Structure formats: C-alpha cells, structure tokens
Amino acid sequence: MKKSHRIIQLYVAAAMAGGPAEAGASGFALIEQNASGMGNAYAGQAAAAENASTIFFNPAGMTRLPGKQISGAVSAIRPVAEFTDDGGSRSPSPFLPLGNNGGDAGDWNLIPSGYFSWQLTPKFWAGVGVTVPFGLETDYDPNFIGRFQSQKVKLITYDVNPSVAYQINDFVSVGGGISFQHLKVNLDRSFSAVLAPLAQSVSLDDSAWGWNLGAMFNLGPQTRLGLAYRSAIDYELAGRVTLATVGSATATASLSLPDSLSAAISHQLTDKWQLLGDLTWTRWSKIQNVPLVLTSGLGAAPAGTVSDTLDLQFRDAYRAGLGANFRWTDNLMLKLGVSYDRTPVPDAIHRPAFLPDNNRIAIAFGAKHQLSKAGALDVGYTHLFLSDGGTLRNKDVPGVNAGEQGIVSGSYKVRANMVSVQYTHSF
C-alpha cells in the first residue's frame, strides 16, 4: 500500500513537466505573440519594432512608434504528434492491456495577444502587453499505451506586462517592464491499481512576478541592433490531486520557467528589401528535476511527504532566424523567413511521452497590408518540421521499481501548422 501511494506522488510530479508544444520556440515556450513576425519566422523581432507588439520582444522598440497604437493578434496552432510503439512498451501490470499508439495527440489551439503603446513625451513611452508566453496541450486516446504516464495534459500561462521606454538620443533607446504571470496545469491519466486502472486528475496553479529589459541601437541610417532579456519566473504551484475511489489531497510543486536573451538585427538593404536576423538563448537548464510535496494526507502518505523528483535534465536551447521583407507596393509588404530551434530535451531517455520534443526548422511567409493611414492588417503562416526519429526510451521514474508506471518505447513523428492574423491601429 505504501508503494502505491509513492507512485501517486510521482505521477503528480510528472504532470509538472508538461506536454508537447510543437510550436514557435523550443520546449513549451510560445513565440507566437504577433502575426507581423510570423511571416518572418520571428526572425529579428527584437529589432523590427513594426508595431506595439514590440512590447513583448523588446520594449525599447516603442520609441519607434509615434503617438498611440493598439494592436491585437490571434494565432491558431495545429500540432500533430503521432507515436509508434517499437515493441518495447510495457503496461505497469500483467493484468492490464497494453493499449494502442494513442492516435494524434495534437489539436487546434488559439493564442491571443494584445498591446497598447503611448508616446507620453517626445522621449518617453509607456505601454502594456497581454500575452500567453508558455503553453501546451496534448490529448491521447483513452487506451494509449502510455496512458499511465500521460493521457491529457494542459499547461498555460497568462502574462500582463506593463512597460516603459526612453529615447536617450538618436542612436540609443532603452526599455523595460514587469510581468504578472499566472500558470495553470491540468493533468488526466490512468493509475495502475494492479487489477484495474483508476482515473487520476491533477490541478495546480500559481501567480508570480518577472521582468524584462531591452535596448535598441541605430548603427547607421539603415541598420538597427536590438538586445532583449526576459527574466526567469519562479512558481510555487498549489492545488489538488484526485484518485478515483481513494480520495484527494492538496499538493505543491516548485517550477521555474526559463529566462531568455535575444540579439537581433534589422537592415534596410534597398528601398524594396529589408533583412532581419536574430539569435536567442533560453536557459531551459533551470528545469532539471521537479519535486512534489503533499500538504495533506492521501491514503497512507502523510502530509509533508516529499516525493521523488521527475528527472528531466533539460539543457539550454538556442534559436536562430533569418527573414526578409519585400515592399511590393506602397501599401503591401511580402514577408518570408526561416528559423532553427534546438530542443531542451537532451536524449531519448529524457524524452517522456508528455514532451516528445525535438530539434525543429520553421519555414514561414506572410504579408502586411496598409488598409489606411491609421490601420494595418498582418497575416502569417508557418510550417514546423521536427527532426524525424524522435525516439523515446522511457526509463522509470526514479524511486519506482521497473514497470510500475509502465514503459513507453518507440518513435514520434511531429509537425505543426500555424496561422496568425493581426490588426494594428495608430491614432
């Protein structure tokens, strides 16, 4: 009985690792914070400063926006994650059926964002952004072979980011802001009761604070350099874990979402062509293990019990992007871009069923139409290619005897399509 309750705790810890986020940046970060950048695969966004969405990518970019500006975008993401068992998967009990490959774990998701920028004086700007910087959702078939590790997971953050910017002189601008961010995690999975599986659900959330800084440098009449940093945010999540026929308990888990640093460049090559590029580093290595503490009793497990930790061993990741804009007419700009992201998942042993992430390449194109002097419409499309052969050789959660959680062994094919629409109004 004691062993069973230990496994319950470990399953809760596993929920905190999230699920596959076959979108935008590596891991479960979401870079889809506007449509104007999607057409360039988000290359050079810390230097582009096309509209008020620069508040997310580099708040110093507000100094390029005269007057007031409001901008809103909706991005639709459709990931596909298909698992194929290689014969090495095992159920946690010989009395339980093995299961199937789980079908397509992805589905359509909408990512909204909104921004407001206001030039208060000739040198000073203020603004606010509302975004979803981290998120994921995966939903396998109920009879998925790995349902004892992950069946349905949803993680989402909501971020409110008031910001300011100051133009020091014609060559240098700086900006910064604070972020109030709320994180919510939900998990549904099966728990092995030896003779029959039990339904398990987990719900945890917390709010925390972070900050961001940016600078923009005019290197010449046609060239800008942007530098931007977003801080890590530390959470002490709290909520409940419920196991059918057993009961529920309160629990907490510590999780730090990573900080990132981006350097970007924008160069006006000719009257028609603009070139963009960037390099972004994300410190995913902040997530190595995810602990869990029960704050009330669950069966034989008393309050204060510390579970074994989930062994993810994330590594730092980087992203490189190149893009170009072509001004077709005075009112129409065409966009294209490509980017490469390195996954934070280090190897097949640490690629769990709830995060079958891999290195990815994005190919993108889009357009901007100036509808009027005040209004502009941006649209973008991106296709993500994830490296083939994303193998998974799940080891058991540390502290659990072989097979107690089941073993998932096989390969993934993952890809994604994304579209985004944005309207910007200046006044």
Image: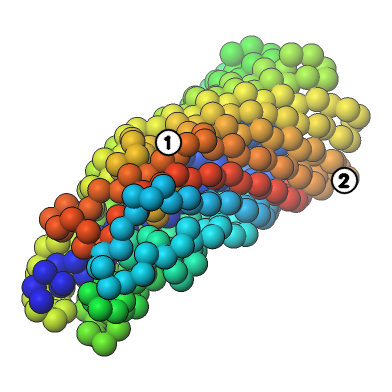
Q: Amino acid at mark 1?
A: Thr
The answer to whether residue 367 is seen in the rendering is yes
Is the residue 275 above or below the residue 179 in the image? Answer: above
Colour pattern of the rendering: rainbow
Is the residue 318 above or below the residue 390 in the image? Answer: above
Marks 1,2: beta carbons within 8 A:
no
Q: Position of residue 188 (x, y in %)?
A: 39, 71
Q: Which residue is mark 1?
A: 343
Question: As drawn, is 14 to the left or to the right of 62?
Answer: left
Q: Position of residue 249 (x, y in %)?
A: 21, 78
Residue 90: name its quadrant: bottom left
Residue drawn 91% across and 29% down?
A: 329
**Which circle marks residue 269 in the picture?**
none
Q: Position of residue 97 (x, y in %)?
A: 36, 69
Separation (CA) of disc 1 from disc 2:
39 Å
Secondary structure under tag 2 reads: loop
The answer to whether residue 262 is seen in the rendering is no
Question: As drawn, is 80 to the left or to the right of 411?
Answer: right
Q: Which residue is mark 2?
A: 371
Is the residue 202 above or below the residue 160 in the image? Answer: below
Residue 325: name its quadrant: top right
Q: Amino acid at mark 2?
A: Leu
Q: Residue furthest bottom?
A: 245
Residue drawn 30% across and 48% down?
A: 394
